[in-house]
Amino acid sequence: MQLVDLIFNRIFIGFVFLSILCTANAKDDGTDSSITIEKEMQSFVVNADGSFVATHDTVLLINAERAISTYAQRSLSYNRALETLDVTDAYTQKPDGHIIVVPLSEIKDQQEPRSSDARMFQDTGAKVVTFQEVAVGDRLVIKYKKNRRAALFPGQFEDISAPAFYHTRHFSLIYDMPDRLQLNADSIGFAASMPVSPAGRKIYRWDYIPTENHRVEQGSIDWMEYRPRLYVSTFADFASFAQAYDKNARDMAVVTPKISELAHKITANLSDPRAQAWALANWVRKNIRSVTVPIGAAGVIPHDAGSVLDNRYGDSKDHAALMESLLAALGIDSTPALINRDRLYAAPSVPTLRFFNQVITYIPSLDIYLDSSADSIAAGYLPDNEIDKPVLLTKTGKLARTPPTQASRVAGISRFKFAADGSADFTKSMSLTGWEAEVYRAGNRTVAQADRDNLVARILAAQGQKGTGTFDPGDMNANGDDYQVKFAGHIANFLAFPGIVRIPVSSTFNSAIFDTVSGIALEKERTQPFSCRDVTMDEQSLMEMPKEATITGIPTPVTIHDAYFDYTSEYIRHENSVLIKRHYQFHHSGRVCNASEFDAMRPAIDQMVRDLTAQIIVQRL
């Protein structure tokens, strides 16, 4: 994510937060009422070698105009090297029963955009079906058949399904299996039927139990962890799943002379294995472009490390293969580690590729994880969505877990010098330490100079202010976990002088503490597990008033020390200035907090909110 996006996301959160301070959340069950899923039938006939034919039969009822642009065109993904996909029936059904069949010319093969510029991944395609003359009240009917000619893992089968956030009247999953393949399941909200056993076969069926949807709360983890979903797998355990992946991957990490030469060149001046590993990971993330295709969609066999190096791109499993070979060239043993790339933090009881859909690297002797496919995260850190996650180490078959926390600190110093007309000159410096440093640095490298030039004006405009300014992105090409940026500018309409004005103490130009607390406080109550992370933030802001104005009131300092938060604020008045000092630190043993923990946090959150929305009162006659 670019720095511009990070800043504006924080501003958006702050605005949403302010808008709900005085209003209760309206009742919202999370259901998108624009369509109704009247029928969703998925039937799999699985062969002994793990190949299968899947038949999909879907009927969607269009309830609102806004749904037409989204659902009048349906994209069906498949892997052209492993599958065929045939649309057997597709039509629009009018309320009077009249049918408008989708012509063959409107069923087109397309390259999926994420792999269109990566030759090694161009087996990933999509059939795009465009329905005709769609209007509110119509039903969109589609039937298609996917023929998987070869299993990703020979002799095995696995799948995952879940109802979407729509009114779903009927959703059934049927698996017709060879009787020698035991189908194991992990389900929430699906009713299992007693398996039927015709000669040599065993037919399993699960039916979705219609239930009330609950709105996905702000910041909650992926709803697949607690809402209705079904995982099925023929793998007996995680060890056998890991072994199947390792069998495919082990020969792809061969150390070639070219790889050996590169590994020694990158680490020529380093003798410490940890420093060597970080240097290799940093080189790979900067020089091997990452293609974000999840495992399964692009198969499960990595490209060999030599070809990844030659082509200078690859997906996560290719990155892991190259990292393994580079490390091996230095005598450092490593293993691919399967992980979930989404916001899921608890592994199901049955292993599937739809859960373990990404590969990173684990070095047992150093007990460190590396993700060289994350080009905006410096080695020594992991992307935020990979912290406190279950991982499956493919060489040993053991389930492990990534570190529950990682260092992060943000410090900001601001100065506002107000004029008698209410305008203000300001400066701000920010120092980022830890995993966020490279996120901001890498993001800035992708921002055009014109966008940097306009950044301050855009931030001010988003806050309802007029002004101009400059942005100094610092050293964007440095390494390490420390990064500094600076802002400076002029705000034309900050204070509405003359008269009595109230200055929000959060007016520190992109306050990280305000934005962080705002994000937590977006929900008054929580029923779902939500993401939370350790972070330390310090901010100072000096407000200098013109001689024509008088400071008549400042907020009361606040001190909070409990099981979750260390928070202090000070308001130091000196002559006609106020120095605001804040410290915020959150403590938690893992990346996920639950509803009862939120209840315990609530008093401190409310106290911080009151402090962050307090005001300095200034009078100018």
Image (tube, grey):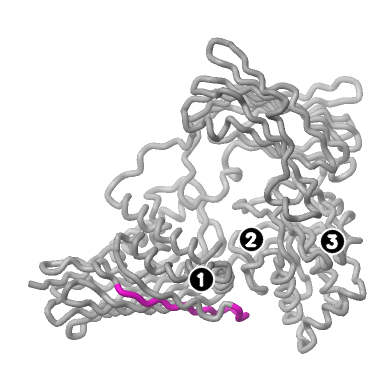
Residue furthest bottom as drawn: 269
Q: Mark 2 = which residue?
A: 386
Q: Nearer the viewer, residue 253 or 290?
A: 290
Residue 47 percent across, percent down from the top left:
88, 32
Residue 236 percent across, percent down from the top left:
82, 44
Residue located at (84% from left, 43% from top): 81
Q: Mark 1 = which residue?
A: 449
Check disc 1 and give the amino acid type: Gln
Mark in front: 1 vs 2: 1
Check disc 2 and give the amino acid type: Glu
Check disc 3 and give the amino acid type: Lys
Mark in front: 3 vs 2: 2
- Does residue 480 show up magenta in the picture? yes
Q: Which label number is shown at residue 395?
A: 3
Question: Which quadrant would the N terminus be assigned to in this image?
Answer: bottom right
Q: Is residue 38 left or right of residue 63?
A: right
Residue 607 percent across, percent down from the top left:
31, 62
Mark in front: 3 vs 1: 1
Question: Which quadrant would the C terminus be assigned to in this image?
Answer: bottom left
Q: Are marks 3 and 1 in contact (CB under 8 Å)?
A: no
Count neighbours of disc 3 (C-alpha within 10 A) and say few if under 14, some if 14 to 19, many if 20 or more: some
Q: Quadrant of residue 129?
A: top right
Write the start and end of the magenta stretch as one range: 477-490
Q: Which label number is shown at residue 95?
A: none
What kind of element bears circle 3? Answer: loop
